[in-house]
Image (spheres, coloured by chain):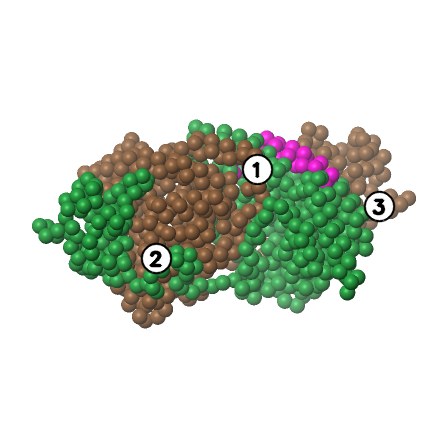
Chain colours: A brown, B green
Amino acid sequence: MFLNKTTFKLDRKSKQALYLQLANTFIELIKNRKLLPKTKLPSSRALAENLNVHRKTVVACYEELSLQGWVESIAKKGTFVNANLPELKAQNFITDDNKNANRTGFNFYKNKDFTRISPQFKDEFMYLNDGISDARLTPTEDIARIYRRICSRKHIYKDMSYGSLFGNEKLRKTLANYLNKTRGLSVFYEQILITRGSQMGIFLASKLLLKTDDIVVVGETNYASADSTFLEREAKLNRVSVDENGLVTKEIEEICKKHPINAVYVTSHHHHPTTVTLSAERRIHLLNLAKTYNFAIIEDDYDYDFNYNHSPILPLASHDINGNVIYIGSVCKTVAPVFRVGYLIASKEFVNEAANQRRFIDRQGDALLELTFEEFIKNGDLDRHIKKVMKVYKTRRDIFCQLLKERFQGVFQFEIPKGGLAVWLILHKKYSWSNIAKIARKYQLEIGEWQRYDSAKTRHNAIRIGFATYSEKEIYELIHRLSKTILEVKSLEKSL
Amino acid sequence: MFLNKTTFKLDRKSKQALYLQLANTFIELIKNRKLLPKTKLPSSRALAENLNVHRKTVVACYEELSLQGWVESIAKKGTFVNANLPELKAQNFITDDNKNANRTGFNFYKNKDFTRISPQFKDEFMYLNDGISDARLTPTEDIARIYRRICSRKHIYKDMSYGSLFGNEKLRKTLANYLNKTRGLSVFYEQILITRGSQMGIFLASKLLLKTDDIVVVGETNYASADSTFLEREAKLNRVSVDENGLVTKEIEEICKKHPINAVYVTSHHHHPTTVTLSAERRIHLLNLAKTYNFAIIEDDYDYDFNYNHSPILPLASHDINGNVIYIGSVCKTVAPVFRVGYLIASKEFVNEAANQRRFIDRQGDALLELTFEEFIKNGDLDRHIKKVMKVYKTRRDIFCQLLKERFQGVFQFEIPKGGLAVWLILHKKYSWSNIAKIARKYQLEIGEWQRYDSAKTRHNAIRIGFATYSEKEIYELIHRLSKTILEVKSLEKSL
């Protein structure tokens, strides 16, 4: 083939050096068999003249091609396309790149139980969530200032290479102090593994506790991500009832009498999703069962910091004298989900093994962010932040609950939550969430995956709605959209 | 029992409110059965006087205990320890907290093949590594400045709540452009999953490709973390030879003729650990085999940016027209390990499923850091950084290799690496690394886990030594300590 300017389309403004542009075109021609093996390439002088480039550029290109093995230079004879190059097999040559992006040339395992991709958010829509904090209240600039200060420390580079699998030691120590003080724990820093967030804690605990057909006990309603993490381990879920005092531990005892179980997953502070608190009696019962039957309690204390009427209830982990509790939480849920710093606390032996497992999924955490939060906690910034936002969230809870009560009599039933950022909203049985979700979209309100709150199919007809992410004005707007939705649902009801 | 000041040890300087300190002591007494169920507590007035605290403090404490279910208030009768509280069973009461920290009250699965905890570093020691960048050269302040600027953006809170499983979309788009331009890829941003680093990419790929007894082909020498990730999936490793042109693809073909394989793992740019480059001929052969036998190629392009003599060789992924390559890399290995931003690139379908798997281990990445690196790449900072450090690393490589050559004739054999940050150092067969490692410690030099370079037990007697983390002065010091070590090894040899 004749090699000219049209063949090469050199772009002198590109960041890529000319010799590389040349080389890449040659590689394409060779791969596509437009230049066959053994073809002689033009001399560097001839090609340079032809393309109006410096001869050195062509020489550099040929060297590059030779180094990569696409061509061979034979002394006094010239440069030839490598004789041994096999032909690159293609389905057929594709001009539509998008088709290529969709082609997978091999088989792989898919998780049938759980294929769910995040929704695409539209600005004009309001999206319900299951109780997350309001990112607008984050002291972002304070955190960024600490971050930058830490980055300018003289010896900070020592924390910037490969570090401990357990997370930054300073943060582990500060966290041990902080949790011992605020949550009644009595742990050493060696018992703390810094994770990216609670989910990583749940994953690591499941990895060490559960294999195929092992049994984990969960509530008949339960945090959906925990359920799917256990199912992903191919474990069996044994569900027990949840009443106004949390998990019914008597049922756990019945199960233990029949066969061994590996773990119980519990959100003791405010049961996810129904928001009830595990009573003291059941706490002790559960701890005793764990001792008698040698199982692990995975205590996910996701919203310890959020209490309106009273001080938080100490976690099960604070009463754990037999080493049965794996305590999981997140420093940063309280601040904003973007800051991924959480922890897993258990015996040293368990934590060592969890660290070894962590190696496989994510070599280490972000020491700079960990050090930032170390300061944020030690300085009292975290406590101050919690105090500040709790006032805001309490107001939001009160307005939200008041409006729910006023506007939806006979439609919704709920208890005002004593803590946490969500309400467990029970819909009267003559209505269905499926209908509401459909109609709500007309009013730019997205109910979300309401089905996930009833994975055990008990038909409780309830969902969990977070109120904390909305300003007072937004709460009114949300209730307004919900009112219009319910009005239409009711009128449809009547017209039937 | 008599409740007095000694019982309660109230600390008025503590951050914890007095009523909570009171309550926690009560809980301890109840749990330890020093206050038995049905015991009547003193009246709030009496206890307040006794302890010299305000009566409201005791009332708040009793309310707290009641809320938590430890006590019951019976109108006109008083406050009693809850009659239904079971006794908390303990092995026996432990006074040594440390024993508690070591107690695990349940069984769990350990990974026998791979229990390795990071070493504790001592300041006066020099530690060999397998080729990592020098954190001291990181433009930390520039990065921190971008980070802070991003944090002060008006609408940044939108990126601070729960975000996409795939990583920040802006970064994915910038990365698609960047990689298409610099590495000859032609990918859409939807084909990119942002990970925390290469290890997470290897993990996610293994998760989707390998189950028990599935086969993955690797080199007879191979990156140890990849090996252990595959073994952790309970996959079988089929090893093929590695020569001066990389993986011997003919041997892969022989394996495929006998039985199906699921994947080939390859570090094509510079084979880990031996540093050789996969030749063009073998690249095409491997791609053709993947097409014919429907397997996945996991291409770990860990050091694409590090080349001394020529431009980098385009990855296999740039020639992948049949969707066989899963391309894994890390933006930040080039900068510093602390910045955990990597990527996995494959077909959209595969990337979607990888994102679903990512949900289990770590809900999402750090959008603020991702946006920081988006700017760092788009502004050309990354390219400028690479150019700058490459000059430094080239000098270090040259000095290191020159000294190795001068000082250790007949002891070590090696090739000067054309790229990357490490040398593959073959020890003469009359010496052993085990001896050297032992003696080196006397001279404050830690050879590290030399065994991991020969997991296939081929007795090549070589290890990989990174040179990039040492300044010129430190290289001289390192060589000095190694010289003293070798001298002692030789003299021991003679005296035998």
> In what element is the residue under mark 3?
strand
- Of B427 and A94, nearer the camera is B427
| Viewer-closest of A375 and A122 | A375
How packed is label 2: few (under 14 Cα within 10 Å), some, or many (20 or more)? many
Instruction: Mark 1: give few (<14), some (14-19) or many (20+) Cα within 10 Å.
Output: few
Q: Identify the residue shown where x is 71% and y is 39%.
A: B472
Residue shown at 32%/51% (left/top)?
Answer: A315
How far is the residue under mark 2 from the one under mark 3?
74 Å
Name above or below for residue A14 compared with residue A355: above
Q: Is residue A490 visible?
A: no
For the record, the magenta segment spans B370-396
User: For numbered disc 1, what is the local secondary structure?
Assistant: loop
For mark 2, give the secondary structure.
loop
Give the residue at mark 3.
Answer: A73
Q: Which residue, given by chain and number where applicable, does mark 2 sit on?
A: A320
Q: Is residue A82 left or right of residue A471?
A: right
Residue A24 at what x, y percent from top left? 72, 40
Disc nearer the start of the sequence (1/2): 1
Q: Amino acid at mark 2?
A: Asp
Cα gap from disc 1 to disc 2, whole angstroms: 39 Å
Give whichever of discs 2 and 3 has the lower sequence position. Answer: 3
Q: Residue at x 80, y 41 (%)?
A: A62
Q: Nearer the viewer, mark 3 or mark 1?
A: 1
Q: Amino acid at mark 3?
A: Ser
Q: Nearer the viewer, residue B293 or B313?
A: B313
* Residue A447, picture quadrant: top left
Residue placed under numbered mark 1 in the picture: A155
